[in-house]
Image (tube, rainbow, N blue to C red):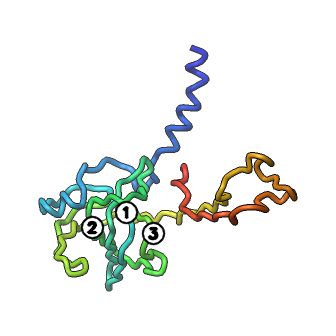
Amino acid sequence: MRIALSLLPVVALLGGCATAPKPLAGEFAALTPAESAASARSGDRVRWGGEIIKVEPHADSTCFEVLSRDLDASARPLRRDRSDGRFIACRAGFYDPEVFVRGRDITVVGSVTGSEKGRVGEFDYTYARVAADAIYLWPKRPLVVEQRNFWGPDPFWGPGFGPYWGGGYWGQPPIIIVKPRPDPKP
């Protein structure tokens, strides 16, 4: 009993880390953009996200072309090579294309209003279309810089200790790796 009570705050804390931001919370249809475009369904309430491809402001609304990605527990798009198709989400108001730039992560909540024909290069494409109630632009993912020695630690002198305490006096120069940091935990 005592152990269970002591674990309760830990479980509550960990459960709170995997929640979606308030504008993205709710219950949604288990429908992908590709399925929606193929079936021409409309009226379903969805939460889709992905990578911004293009932003087009109009007189009274702004439309986003998005490459759909799977969402994590907090509703942020995952960075994977897999996609569930493309969709177009439109919302009333002006969203600046210099803020909502190509490549940024976005999550949309709204109702499917049907599909729209378009082109991706020379390919005729059918987009699912969403009337968005919420547009959530995620913060940029920070970059991680790692420095690795090509040969690894020196077995004779130990890691970081070369014959002149500089480490790596003999051998290749270090390799610098710049990669996106994994999804931050909310």
Residue placed farthest to the bottom in the image?
A: 59
Indicate left or right for 3 with 114 as reference: right
Asked if the residue under mark 2 is in contact with the one under mark 1, i.e. CB atoms within 8 Å, the reply is yes
Residue 90 in percent (x, y) is at 30, 72
Residue 95 in percent (x, y) is at 42, 77
Please name whichever residue, 32 or 149, is drawn nearer the observer in this view of the structure: 149
Give the residue drawn at x 33%, y 63%.
133
Secondary structure beneath dot 1 equals strand
Residue 24 in percent (x, y) is at 40, 55
Find disc 1 in the rendering and name its residue: 50
Secondary structure beneath dot 2 equals strand
Please name whichever residue, 175 or 79, is drawn nearer the observer in this view of the structure: 175
Q: Is residue 77 above or below residue 67?
A: above
Give the residue drawn at x 39%, y 61%.
107
Marks 3 and 1 sit apart, C-alpha to C-alpha, by: 8 Å
Q: Amino acid at mark 3?
A: Arg
Residue 104 tag number: 3
Find disc 2 in the rendering and name its residue: 87
Precedes in sequence: disc 2 or disc 3 = 2
Asked if the residue under mark 3 is in contact with the one under mark 2, i.e. CB atoms within 8 Å, the reply is no
Residue 138 in percent (x, y) is at 48, 63
Indicate left or right for 108 with 15 as reference: left
